[in-house]
Image: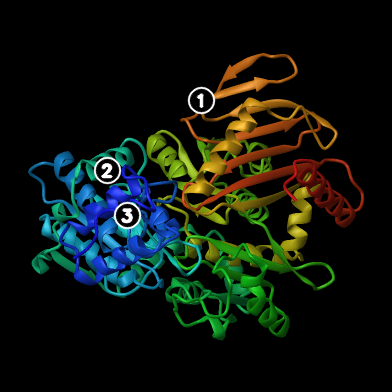
Amino acid sequence: MFSLILETQFNMNSPALERANQWLNSNISEEEKKQIQSLLDNSDGTELEDSFYKSLEFGTGGLRGLMGIGSNRMNKYTLGLATQGLSNYLLSTYPNVQIKVAIAYDCRNNSKYFADITADVFSANGIRVFLFEELRPTPQLSYAIRHFECHSGVVITASHNPKEYNGYKAYWNDGAQLTDPHDVNVIAEVNKMQSIDEVSFSRNAELISTIDSSFDDLYIDEIKKVCLSPELISKHSDLSIVFSSIHGTGITLVPKTLQTLGFNNVTVVEEQRETDGNFPTVVYPNPEEKEAMTLALKQASISKADVVMATDPDSDRVGIAVPNNEGEYILLNGNETGSLIIYYVLKRLEELGELPSNGYTVKTIVTSDLICKISKSFGIECKETLTGFKYIATMIRELEGKQKYIAGGEESYGYLISDFVRDKDAITSCAIIAEMTAYAKEQGQSLYQLLEVIHKEFGLYYENLISITKKGKKGAEEITTMMQEYRDNPPVEINGSKVEYLLDYKSSEKKNLLTGNNDLMDFPSSNVLQFITEDGSKISARPSGTEPKIKFYFSVFSDKYDDYKLAKSQLVEKVVSIQKDMNLL
C-alpha cells in the first residue's frame, strides 16, 4: 500500500506531490512504485521535488535529463510520453499516410533500451520504424531520415553531458531537429495526456526494420562528395592523425571514413576506443574540456601528430589540437576551428572556380564574428541564427532552392559542411579537418600557422566561455532571477568600457544605452542577452536549453599587433578582467 500524501513534508497542493501521486496510481511496475515511495518517505523531500516538480520539455537539444524515476527524469515513461505525443502529432499531421520514422542511439547507459522503447511506442501506433541495429552517430540519423524519406526521427543521446544523463532528440522530415511550431505542438500533445496509461507500449514487430552497417558506406559516399582536395590527400596520405572517440560512437565511422578518403596514418587512442556509457577515462565526455583530451594529447606527442581530433559520445561535435611553432600541442576552441573550416572551404572553392554566386555561410549569435568577416571577404553572405543548430537547419530549409548553403557552425564545436545532413556533423568535419591539414601542409604550414595567417588578415579574435551550474528547481529559479536583474539593471560599464548596446533577444530589442534609441531585431524570441561595449567587446548571457546552467560568452579582438603570441595573451587577460569585473570569477 503506497501513501499518496505526505502532509508533514510537502504542501498538499505541490505540483511535485500531485505528479508523484499520479504516477503511483498508474500502471507502472511495482518496483518503480517502490522507488517513488522511497522518495516520499525521505524526510528531506528535495529529491522528490527535483524529480517531479515539472515534466521534461524540449529545449535547444530536445529532451534531456538525469536518468531515474519521475516526470523530470529520463525513464521509460517520460520517453514513452514524448514518443506517444510525437506519434499523436504525426498521425494528425499526416492522415491516411504510412508514417515512417528512423531511430538511432549512442553509447550511453540505457540508450539501446530507450531506443527499443521508442520503437515499441511508434510501432504500437501503426508507424513504420527504421531502427539502427547498433549504436551510430547522430548525423547519420539525420541522413537516414532523408534517405528513407521518413516523416520524423529520434536519436537517444545526451550529447556531452555527464554519465548520469540521457536524452531524446526529435527530428522532422528534413532531417533537422524539431523547431517551432512542431516542438511546441508535440509538447502540447504530451500535455493533453492525463496518465502514463495513455501510452501504447505494445511493440508491433512487423513494422520495425533494422538498419545494418552497410548503410555506413552510403553515408561515407556522401562525405566523399564534400571533400575538395583528393589530390592533396593522396600526396599527404601519411599525414599523422590521432583520433579519440572518448568511448562514443565516433569509433564506428571516423577511422573508416579517414581510411576511405586515403589517410593511412591514423592512430586511435586505444584506452578510449571501447564504447562505454560510464566514460571511465574522463570526468566529462566533452572534447571542449582539456581533461577529456589528455590521453589523445599524450598519444599525439608520441606520434608527432599533425592534428588531434576527438568526438563527443554521439559524434555531432569535434574538438581538435594542433602543434604550435614550438611543437607544443594546443587546443583550438570552437570558434577557431570553425573559422579555419570556413576559410578553407571558401578558399578552396574559389581556387577551383566553384564559389557559388548565391552562396551563404551561417553562424549563431554567440559564435565569432570572424566567420562573417572571412565570408564577406570572399563575397559570400554570412547569416546569423539563434543558438542551437536546429536554427541553422531551419535556415537551410527555408532557403533551399533560393540560395546555396556552403558551411556553418557554432562555438560549441559543431559544424556542418554541405547539407546532405541537417544537423552538426563531426564525421564530415573530421574529414574536412584532415583534408584542411593536408592543404596547409602543402603550403608549408601547420593548422596553427594557417590560423595565424587568418588572424593577421582579418583581425585577432579571442572567445571564451564560462558555465555556471545551478541544480534543481532552486537553481532554475536563481538563473531566472539573474537574467531578470540583467534586464532591469544592465551594467553601465564593463572593464572600463561603456556598454553601448544591450541586445535582448527575448523582446527582440536592440537598445542603445548611450542614446536611449531602440531598434527591433529580426529574430525569434529567445532568452539571451548581449552587451556590446564601446571597445567592441561582446558579452552574451544565455541559460542553457538542455542543462541546469547559465552560460556567459566573451568575445574580444585586436586588429593591430606585431607579436601574435603576445597579442593573444593580452586578449586572454582582457577576458579574465571582464569576467572579474562582472563578478563571474
Front-most of residues 261 and 477: 477
Q: Can residue 147 be seen in this view?
A: no
Query: Which kind of residue does numbered mark 2 sit on?
Result: Val
- Please identify, in this view, whether the residue under mark 1 or under mark 2 is nearer the observer: 2
Residue sitting farthest toward the front? 8
Mark 1 vs 3: CB contact within 8 A? no
User: Residue 6 has which mark?
Assistant: 3
User: Residue 186 has which mark?
Assistant: 2
Task: Give the mark, 1 or 3, whose residue is nearer the N terminus.
Answer: 3
Tell me which corner region of the image, top left, top right, bottom left or bottom right, holds residue 296: bottom right
Mark 1 vs 2: CB contact within 8 A? no
Q: Is residue 66 visible?
A: yes
Residue 216 to residue 543: above or below: below
State the CA–CA distance, disc 1 to disc 3.
Answer: 49 Å
Front-most of residues 387 and 50: 50
Q: Measuring from the top left, give residue 210's x and y in whole percent.
A: 22, 70
Q: In this view, does 531 lie to the left or right of 576?
A: left
SS state under label 2: helix
Q: Measuring from the top left, give residue 149's x and y in whole percent.
A: 23, 53
SS state under label 3: loop
Q: Which residue is drawn at 59% across and 67% down?
A: 434
Query: Which kind of residue does numbered mark 3 sit on?
Result: Leu
Q: How crowded is mark 3: few (under 14 residues within 10 Å), some or many (20 or more)?
A: some
- Which residue carries the number 1 mark? 522
Query: Which kind of residue does numbered mark 1 sit on?
Result: Asp
Where's the N terminus, which quadrant? Answer: bottom left
Residue 473 to residue 538: above or below: below
